Image (cartoon, coloured by chain):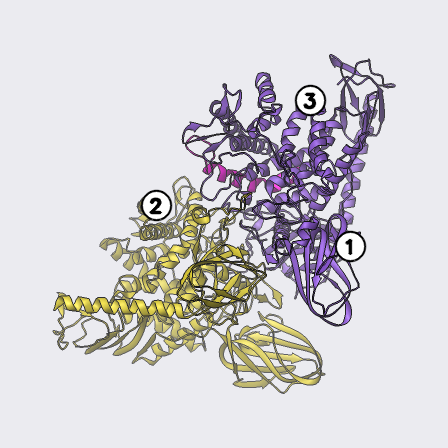
Chain colours: A purple, B yellow
Amino acid sequence: MNNSRNLIVALAFLSIFISEECAKAQKATWIYYPGDYEIWLGNQVQNRRTERGTFFPPFWRMDSHYVLVEFSKKIDLLNEEAINIKVEGQYYVKIDGKLLFGSPEKVIIPAGKHSINIKVFNQASVPSLFIDGTSIKSDNSWLVTFEDKEWIDESGKASDTSSGTVYVNAASWNFYSPDSSPSKFILATRPMSVVSSERKKDGILYDFGKETFGFARFRGLKGKGMLNIYFGESSEEALSKDHCETLDRFPVDNVLAKDFTSNTSKAFRYIYVEKDNSLSYDSLSMLYEYLPLDYKGSFRCNDEQINKIWDVAAYTLHLTTREFFVDGIKRDRWMWSGDAYQSYLMNYYLFFDSPVVSRTIFALRGKDPVTSHINTIMDYTFYWFMSIYDFYQYTGNKQLIEQLYPRMKSLMEYCLSCRNADGMMQGLAGDWVFIDWADFKMSKAGEVSFEQILFCRSLETMALCASLLDDTANAIIYNNLAAELRSRLFSTFWSDKENAFIHNRENGVKSSQVTPFTNIFAVLFGYLDQDKTNAVKENVLLNPNALKITTPYMRFYELEALCALGEQKHVLNEIRNYWGGMISLGATTFWEKFNPAETNPGLLAMYGRPFGKSLCHAWGASPIYLLGKYYLGIRPTSPGYKTFIVEPSLGDLQWMEGDVPTPDGKIHLYCSQKEIRVKADSGTGTLRFKSLSKPVSKGVEIRKTGDKQYEMSILKDQEYVVKYKNGE
Amino acid sequence: MNNSRNLIVALAFLSIFISEECAKAQKATWIYYPGDYEIWLGNQVQNRRTERGTFFPPFWRMDSHYVLVEFSKKIDLLNEEAINIKVEGQYYVKIDGKLLFGSPEKVIIPAGKHSINIKVFNQASVPSLFIDGTSIKSDNSWLVTFEDKEWIDESGKASDTSSGTVYVNAASWNFYSPDSSPSKFILATRPMSVVSSERKKDGILYDFGKETFGFARFRGLKGKGMLNIYFGESSEEALSKDHCETLDRFPVDNVLAKDFTSNTSKAFRYIYVEKDNSLSYDSLSMLYEYLPLDYKGSFRCNDEQINKIWDVAAYTLHLTTREFFVDGIKRDRWMWSGDAYQSYLMNYYLFFDSPVVSRTIFALRGKDPVTSHINTIMDYTFYWFMSIYDFYQYTGNKQLIEQLYPRMKSLMEYCLSCRNADGMMQGLAGDWVFIDWADFKMSKAGEVSFEQILFCRSLETMALCASLLDDTANAIIYNNLAAELRSRLFSTFWSDKENAFIHNRENGVKSSQVTPFTNIFAVLFGYLDQDKTNAVKENVLLNPNALKITTPYMRFYELEALCALGEQKHVLNEIRNYWGGMISLGATTFWEKFNPAETNPGLLAMYGRPFGKSLCHAWGASPIYLLGKYYLGIRPTSPGYKTFIVEPSLGDLQWMEGDVPTPDGKIHLYCSQKEIRVKADSGTGTLRFKSLSKPVSKGVEIRKTGDKQYEMSILKDQEYVVKYKNGE
């Protein structure tokens, strides 16, 4: 019986494997060198930022794709086969080592074993290839190299490229049509209308009802003169012609009325239009520009304020999830590694779109040599390391680690080479030690404890990845480095007097300042014993006199740490006050910074500019993550949710219901004070809950694991209904 | 008297200094990041190779320019000034830290101190800038960086970029007009006519009279059909439709007769045209494509064969001196570091065009990280190092070393990391150990003595450059490494039995083969004591039974070594036989390979292809170098010919006369058996010669330095006439 069951499981696995392989082989896709398209697209996207009509590019190094790459594939054909070849770039085709004339678009490959080599040069965009035949199709099984080392000697004999050339598997995204080549990629758009408009002294103020993103569209634009468009996330901003962050000025010369769409997309809720009197137009609307994404995750509960917060957070995350995860949609529209790190985590609980995660990770890293930290920010380098193992844990996709491991190693080499005599990292010339925007004074100089804890976690991540790739020697090295640093972290920064980690040490002098950051991460990384955990909870996390975090950015980790310590009830109220606070001030997306304690908490100014603050900032969307991971309580316990835990926590809610996406479907949970229903599309889970009564689930064994503490197993495709009495 | 003279000299220097500074400030030029234009242009040029109508790119990694760079300049104006701004790319302009609206093309800068920052993004070609005002002009005094590290904090305060940002001086070439932007650069062309034509069975064979390069041009092309153009360096090649190396096929559809010029330039002497009968044209001519260069060096003597050889060599060098120094004009048209190294040296005696040297050096090096040897060839990495110090020695321009030193260090790091346990380099997987094309068998495996001697010289070069840049610590390291390797070279490869260096050691076993290469370079580098020098001369260089070199490539060094040992008479005959031999076989430019001892020395085949051999190969042009350096006998003894030596050697000539270019003019020499006339435009020289009689020069002191050996000083701008009796 057992045996036959195993056989059925094995067969089922086999059929999945076969069908996946076939599905893979059935679809040709545009392929390119891993990371190159991401770097190229990142250059395009990040150089679109404007500030008051002026080009405003990043200040870090931007890299380029390899301009010359060779794709290759060995094939074995039963029958002769015609292949169609599409290439972005100049190219040759070699069959069995022989060059074909010109750059053929169609080639007949005879039956039998053959090798295909196609080499492509493209300076302006990424060399990429699309091959479509009956069985031969460009996909990730093709190899690619940027240096094929194939020279010929005097006699015409070609060199052996098999040992000296570094081949990797080609990368792809979703370019499945020969005509949708990578360089042509644009986001989707759809028309949207103005909700209301208001005539002002010299122009018209249009309101689109909520924060949005796209192109302004004028119907029936006519005449000769200047058309001035002022964008605003607030009406104040749109009406402030001298201080709005983005604007467009178009000279128009239309004898006949024409429709006109602005050439660059902008973030706004309001548009204020002023024009020369000689101009006229019929109406203004917009083309909403977005990345099509499935909302795979969901959350609903009895508290409508929390539901609203979840919705606004989801919309915020969608607006900032574009070609890449960008920080905010109005201003930078850049990839910032620390910001993106949070988007990744939120994404796992909403879209579960892994391509946008790997795109962002690749683009942030760029290429060797390393000349500075990622985004020039030391902490942002560390989040980058951490993001890669997370990706593996949530998606089960090891390929990203394989592809990036050489660049992980060289970036870590850079970090290690920057250590001081005490083996710690401190900001050197040109390094930005960011941590957080804070309303209190803190030093960024010397050895900042927060940087060491992230550095330590990064070393642990390197050790994990090294092990995973069987690089045992380096795994040991990284583990030793991490252990040593962790011990220094405690000996240097843990203060028995403050009973918490202190902020930094400068020129050998320890600060007495306790900032929340290091303490929060020590909880999240599980670095603290029970005594120290309690101390941090008391003295930092729940201490009303502790220094206050005023960005959703660090509130993410602060509230996560509290959830990890079982403070869901408290955190729910924090969510209501903080994110609910923004909504009650009219927010339709969440902000870059918010301090409810300020006299004017709705302040629009930041960076010394009256409308500098971003009102749609990815790091504002953390309730998605917190509600999914710590209320629905669902998270993977092995890569790709092969095993997972469901540990619902209602806080003070009566009921909640939602989905958490996984690589092969989703996990659905309903939880009320009396009933838990759970169903998973794949993997094997453990449901863990507290009950005041003996829980019951028909035909299922429920294990008691402690006082009021129960556990039961969740097999895939089965709905479990548990009757219990919530004992949180 | 002395004092006033010094004062005059000082004033003269000052005025030169001032006028140069003014000249510099008077001309705006397009500027860019050092090396970036070279890399970009190198990609364009090297990807133009075709083989029988098919794109044929290099097999090594091609790098890219920095896509985003910032140019900056601090200025102090007496008066307000308008500047015109031209940019290749998207850009912003910041004056005193404030962004100007849009991308302005004209800006008024008020009087006083100001800073200008212009940041440019360009993915497809090199970000470059042209600024022209009354006093403000883009030139090499502008700074440029690929990572400006200017972020702003929450309050709007910009970071201090002064310490953390790596600025370098911007680079330029000769783009002095706002409209001649770098990406638009093309070589010059001029029309040239066919010399003769001959009707063949299916087409017409055109002869342009000599090897040339350019675009085929049809006058009055009419009708619909296919136009087939077969190029040949020989008539055999052009007529071999199936085996000629380059060809073009153009579909034509002209109702009215039109002139047509082919879109890619090719090397040829002959063009064979076949066309469909439905097509007609009036005539064929060509557009000769070339780099405009001054022939600054010259050589004439009583031997017309030598004069002819010099002319053919000069033409060969000109044809291969293009955007860069390429190997040959028919086939690769690539930069090969070992080939280019010889072009640099020849160039110092002909064009003295330093930009084409530095362009080639930059393009060959590309960017970090180093993933293989230059051109994947180990020896070619070493020639690259050696070329940089030579450049300094001939031109006196230290800037190239300054610009390249970081890339020199990282390339040397790569070499050092490739050493085996004995501290030597041997070919690893993917490494090409080239040395030379040879007709005898030689091993490229294990520790090849030739690679170690070049490696040793490269380490010495690194030490010289490190000293020059006051990097004393590294100078010591490199010197020690060089000394150690040099000692190992002798202990491992010098054979007392053979009285010469042996070829290699494989798996601990020393070969007994003596090849000429290491021995030649040991002479050239001055590594040998008198006994060993004599031994090498006897056993290798002048030994008729020694292994024969059959490329002009290694004959360059072989004959140079013999000249260095005073064998000018012998070498002159070698030149007559070898280069004269090619001419007598009809060569109009010199070849890639030539073995006068072969049954068919005019063989056109190579690389297993009937017309594979290049008949216009840069490394064929070495007589220019030999005649300039070892017959006119002129070479710098300190950087930039500040001091130099003139040591004429007639060999068996009756008289010779010529110019050797220097950075500030030229050195002219006439030398017969009885008279020497010399005049230098700058620097201080030493004339050294042998005379059987006591030499006389009016009003000049001539020092006797040995038996028949005399020396006298050459001051600039003075013509010296020496009566003597040649005592060679």
Q: How far apart are marks 1 and 3 (CA)?
A: 48 Å
Residue A573, x across and y down, in percent: 71, 27
Q: Do the residues labelled 2 and 1 touch (CB within 8 Å)?
A: no
Q: Which chain carries label 1?
A: A
Which residue lies under the disc numbered 1?
A197
Q: Is the magenta stretch mostly helix, strand or loop?
A: helix
Residue B399, x across and y down, in percent: 37, 59
Q: Are marks 1 and 3 in contact (CB under 8 Å)?
A: no
Q: Mark 3 lies on which chain?
A: A
The residue under label 2 is which amino acid type? Asn
Is residue B386 shown above or below B194? above
Q: Distance between the residues labelled 2 and 1?
A: 70 Å
Q: Given the current orientation, which residue lies at the most extreme bottom position?
A: B282
Q: Which chain carries label 2?
A: B
In this rendering, position of residue B49 left or right of residue B446: right
Q: Any mark on residue A566, and which?
A: 3
Q: What stretch is highlighted in magenta?
A: A398-425
Closer to the camera in the image, A118 or B699: B699
Q: How far apart are marks 2 and 3 (CA)?
A: 58 Å
- Image quarter where the C terminus of chain B lies is bottom left
- Image quarter where the N terminus of chain B lies is bottom left
Closer to the camera in the image, A691 or A397: A691
Mark 2 burial class by Cα count in 10 Å: few <14, some 14-19, many 20+: some
Q: Do the residues labelled 2 and 3 touch (CB within 8 Å)?
A: no
Mark 1 burial class by Cα count in 10 Å: few <14, some 14-19, many 20+: some
Label 3, secondary structure: give it. Answer: loop
Which residue lies under the disc numbered 2?
B474
Residue A635, x across and y down, in percent: 72, 29
Label 2, secondary structure: give it. Answer: helix
Residue B552 visible: no
